[in-house]
């Protein structure tokens, strides 16, 4: 029996698999490292404070009243209706809740299903770097070719000229992420107008990843693809209820797209997951009626950002305050010549604070001496982390 097992195990190592070039995500690696060294985890992007008690009570209520079987494949109708109303309120566009909105198992499934819907072997997908790490594997699995376009330093701006030069006859999809993870940069109105004009007369599709749409600081505005008709008509716009309502573990996101695009998206979605968690959908449908729960997020997270940055004033790290998301870049230039992976490891093991090295968000790793810190934490955690960082 043991000989057969050994032989089979040997045979399996000879197989060809689909993602040999991708390893365990940096978020898992750094979180494990933080646990090993009992470090403060500002690496992985999740809140360490509770979500609303009312929302928890609503989920419990809908569980107890029997909403525990499959939801409809596109999502619970009441939730889709609330999402349509919110979209109209914020962006002046009322999507059809029946044909244009699908509830997904988190924004990750939404991104993966969108890329799977659109990308065929040989298609090129433009991705702005540094880029969140879920895009590249999905593109690879579909046989597509990722075409990186670097955002301009030091403020991670969209480079109009570089983008225009990157488009080819093979370009199938552009992935836009604003507010941007990992940098926290946001696209401007002028950026969106340029993109709209650039794509006129083409069949290029847009995946607009807007999961941090409610987290924008210093009086700035989030510019959604919903607001630009020619972009909206070619876009899959992705949002996250988990990010908005501090419930990342519930895995709840959604996609809005024109009817024809959504019909194709649902063909893929139904075979990847079919439907998302039913009682949570009913709970969110009711909870979203209180607009203050998402309209107040800007101020809520700006207070956390400002608290963290004020506590870092005596540190040696260089700071450009983030414009959006709940991530902050800190530069360690002048503190170490080491690459950012090594420095992030050292920071965790020796100084007790875990962060994400930014080089991992590029196809070709580069060392800009930059780390990403998550400030979606309670005040005590942020102040303790800042105290440790100031001692370096």
Image (spheres, rainbow, N blue to C red):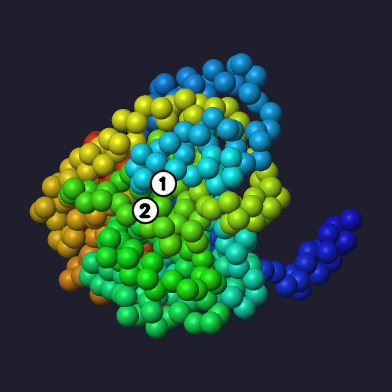
Residue 158 against residue 246 in the figure, above or below: below
Q: Is residue 322 left or right of residue 225?
A: left
Give the residue drawn at x 84%, y 66%.
Answer: 7
Secondary structure beneath disc 1? loop
Give x and y (percent) for residue 304.
23, 41
Give x and y (percent) for residue 111.
53, 56
Q: Is residue 30 left or right of residue 268?
A: left
Q: Which mark is residue 93?
A: 1
Residue 132 visible in the displayed image: no
Label 2 – label 1 distance at C-alpha: 7 Å
Which residue in the protein does label 2 denote? 227
Give x and y (percent) for residue 8.
83, 64
Give x and y (percent) for residue 60.
54, 20
Q: Are marks 2 and 1 in contact (CB under 8 Å)?
A: yes
Look at the image and tell me in which quarter the N terminus lies.
bottom right
Counting residues from the start of the chain, the first of labels 2 and 1 encountered is 1
Q: Quadrant of residue 209?
A: bottom left
Give the residue drawn at x 76%, y 71%.
Answer: 15
Mark 1: give few (<14), some (14-19) or many (20+) Cα within 10 Å: some
């Amino acid at each position: 029996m043991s000989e057969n097992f050994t032989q089979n195990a040997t045979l399996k190592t000879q197989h060809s698999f689909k993602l040999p070039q991708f390893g365990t995500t940096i978020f898992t690696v750094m979180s494990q490292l933080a646990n090993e060294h009992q470090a403060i985890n500002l690496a992985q992007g999740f809140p360490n404070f509770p979500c609303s008690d009312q929302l928890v009570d609503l989920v419990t209520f809908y569980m107890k009243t029997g909403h525990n079987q499959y939801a409809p494949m596109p999502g619970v109708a009441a939730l889709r209706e609330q999402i349509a109303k919110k979209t109209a309120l914020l962006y002046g566009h009322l999507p059809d809740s029946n044909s244009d909105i699908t509830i997904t198992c988190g924004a990750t499934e939404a991104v993966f299903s969108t890329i799977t819907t659109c990308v065929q072997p040989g298609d090129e997908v433009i991705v702005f770097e540094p880029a969140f790490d879920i895009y590249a594997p999905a593109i690879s699995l579909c046989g597509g070719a990722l075409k990186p376009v670097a955002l301009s330093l030091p403020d991670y701006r969209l480079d109009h000229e570089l983008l225009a030069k990157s488009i080819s006859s093979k370009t199938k999809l552009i992935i836009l992420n604003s507010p941007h993870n990992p940098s926290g940069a946001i696209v401007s109105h002028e950026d969106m107008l340029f993109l709209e004009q650039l794509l006129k007369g083409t069949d290029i599709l847009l995946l607009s990843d807007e999961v941090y749409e409610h987290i924008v600081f210093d009086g700035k505005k989030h510019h959604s693809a919903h607001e630009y008709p020619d972009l909206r008509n070619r876009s899959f716009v992705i949002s996250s209820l988990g990010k908005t309502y501090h419930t990342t573990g519930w895995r709840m996101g959604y996609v809005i797209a024109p009817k024809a695009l959504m019909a194709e998206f649902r063909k893929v979605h139904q075979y990847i997951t079919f439907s998302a968690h039913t009682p949570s959908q009913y709970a969110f449908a009711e909870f979203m009626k209180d607009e203050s729960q998402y309209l107040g997020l800007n101020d809520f997270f700006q207070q956390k950002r400002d608290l963290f940055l004020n506590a870092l004033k005596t540190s040696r790290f260089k700071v450009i305050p983030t414009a959006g998301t709940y991530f902050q870049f800190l530069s360690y230039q002048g503190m170490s010549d080491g690459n950012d992976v090594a420095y992030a490891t050292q920071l965790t093991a020796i100084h007790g604070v875990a962060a994400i090295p930014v080089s991992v968000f590029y196809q070709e790793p580069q060392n800009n001496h930059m780390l990403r810190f998550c400030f979606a934490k309670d005040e005590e955690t942020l102040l303790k982390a800042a105290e440790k960082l100031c001692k370096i």
